[in-house]
Image: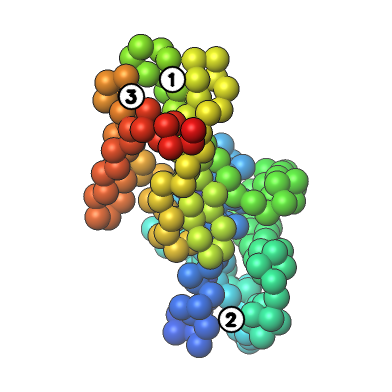
Amino acid sequence: MKLTQIELRTKFKHPKEKKFNKESWPIPELYWSSLKSYNTFKTRKCVVRLDNDWGTDLNKITNQANVIQININFDFKTYFKQSSLDKKKMQLEVLHYGMMKIADMENWEINGLLDAYNNCIERDLKYGFFISKKPKVSPDRKFFINFWCEWDIKICKLYYILYNKNKEEQRRKLLIKKESFFGEFVYYIKYKWDGNTKVILENNHNTKEVFNINVIKHLEEET
């Protein structure tokens, strides 16, 4: 079975639960993005659950309904004094530590987790990706379009990128901006060309949103 989600969350009803959990989305997503073919047998989801001091429950693992959770200690006081970059570093370290503990107890191979950790470092802890593997061409083949996501611990942004027929970038424009904990919407994006100069994008996550993009109009705004 493949891993479909990794979460980094506080203990339930922790004093910093809301403040921490709001910004703990993109680093687990970046880490997980290297693990889509990682074999976790019956497990589909992992949760690294944080507290200041778990006491005798430290490193305790619960396994229920294909979800594994592990309890790890975390220094919240130090964390909330850090810059955004250093917060992301602390998140990555505790997330990786928890995942390695789970792998050891569940007898999973660890090379995939090491690769995921190294990938995060190599990408400077920046989670950015295209919605489509390849840009979509307009019916008259004069334009291509794709969408680029930048998901950080405070804000998740979605840009559209317009290319000419030679796939040279012509326009990059911010289309959607949401708080980080709403960032999952990027996995529910669908879009299509509506004629030669218009694109319809739908966000089907929770409340449905529809955006109409007139590429000619936006190109004219640049001139």
Nearer to the camera, 74 or 177: 177
Classify 46 as above or below 36.
below
Q: Residues within 10 Å of mark 1 (few under 14, many from 20)?
A: many
Mark 2 / mark 3, whichever is N-terminal? 2
Give the color scheme: rainbow, by chain, secondary structure or one colour: rainbow
Mark 1 / mark 2, whichever is N-terminal? 2
Type of the residue with mark 3: Thr
Q: Which residue is mark 2?
A: 51
Q: Position of residue 56 (x, y in %)?
A: 62, 85
Element type where label 1 sits in the image? strand
Where residue 143 is drawn, which disc sits there? 1
Mark 3 / mark 1, whichever is N-terminal? 1
Q: Is residue 206 left or right of residue 175?
A: left
**Residue found 69% across the figure and 71% down from its top:** 83
Classify 58 as above or below 91.
below
Nearer to the camera, 221 or 89: 221
- How far apart in space, not on screen, are marks 3 and 1 (Cα)? 8 Å
Q: Which residue is mark 3?
A: 197
Q: Which mark lies nearer to you, 1 or 2?
A: 1
Where residue 38 is drawn, which disc sits there? none
Element type where label 2 sits in the image? strand
Q: Mark 3 and 1 residues: CB-CB less than 8 Å, in contact? A: yes
Type of the residue with mark 2: Asp
Q: Position of residue 155 (x, y in %)?
A: 50, 60
